[in-house]
Image (cartoon, grey):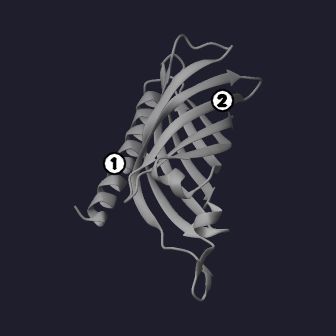
Amino acid sequence: MHASTIRSRAVRIVGAAAAALLVAATTAGAQGSSSSYSIGANAGLVIPVSDLANATSSGYTIAATLGMHQPLAPISFRVEGSFTELPWKDNIAQGAKHRIYGFALDGMYNLGTASTNGGLYLTGGVGYFGTKDTDVQFFLGAGETSTDWNFGLNAGLGYYLPLSGFTVYFEGRYRNVFSNTNQVMFPITVGVAF
């Protein structure tokens, strides 16, 4: 299967999932239920594992989020745009950085009864991620590689804590970007949603 065919399918899957989220939000609004929407951001440490850990060290990730939640439903949805940077190990490419950016559609399932005291939830979803290397030393100086786009999956566990006017959440996830060498990592993030 060609890379362009895989990319096309991944874009269609993420697009269809986003359209389903929009339809669900519109349908819920038409039925009179009061869906709540949130906007937020998160940041944290990323620990590479597998093939990715052989070439890079731990780095950071930042993300912006847009979420939708029905008041009494245990399931909610979130669209996330993220940027991750992992430094190459010095013995491989001193000063070079591996960058991963993309979009993901995640579902979150509340483990237990929703509470004003917070609670645990499972999270998981699909995404489309671009990867490239920057500050790579070539014969004529430093440069960057072209962006390689691939489909990815993530799953994890989180804890949310509602506060006055906003919610703080903590997440640990497993993310796998399916490229020529699987890019597996564990982002550990702290976020806020309004």
Look at the image and tell me whether residue 48 can be seen.
Answer: yes
**Amino acid type indicated by mark 2:** Tyr
| Nearer-the-camera pick, 19 or 141 | 141
Quick one: which residue is furthest to the right in this view? Answer: 164
**Residue corresponding to mark 2:** 169
Q: Residue, x 43% and y 38% (percent of image)?
A: 125
**Residue corresponding to mark 1:** 13
Marks 2 and 1 close (CB-CB < 8 Å): no
Tell me the quadrant of the picture where the C terminus can be found: top right
Q: From what the image shows, is residue 66 above or below residue 160?
A: below
Q: Is 93 placed left or right of 109 in the picture?
A: right
Q: Position of residue 138 (x, y in %)?
A: 57, 82
Q: Earlier in the sequence, mark 2 or mark 1?
A: 1
| Nearer-the-camera pick, 43 or 40 | 43
Tell me the quadrant of the picture where the N terminus can be found: bottom left
Badge 1 marks a residue whose secondary structure is: helix
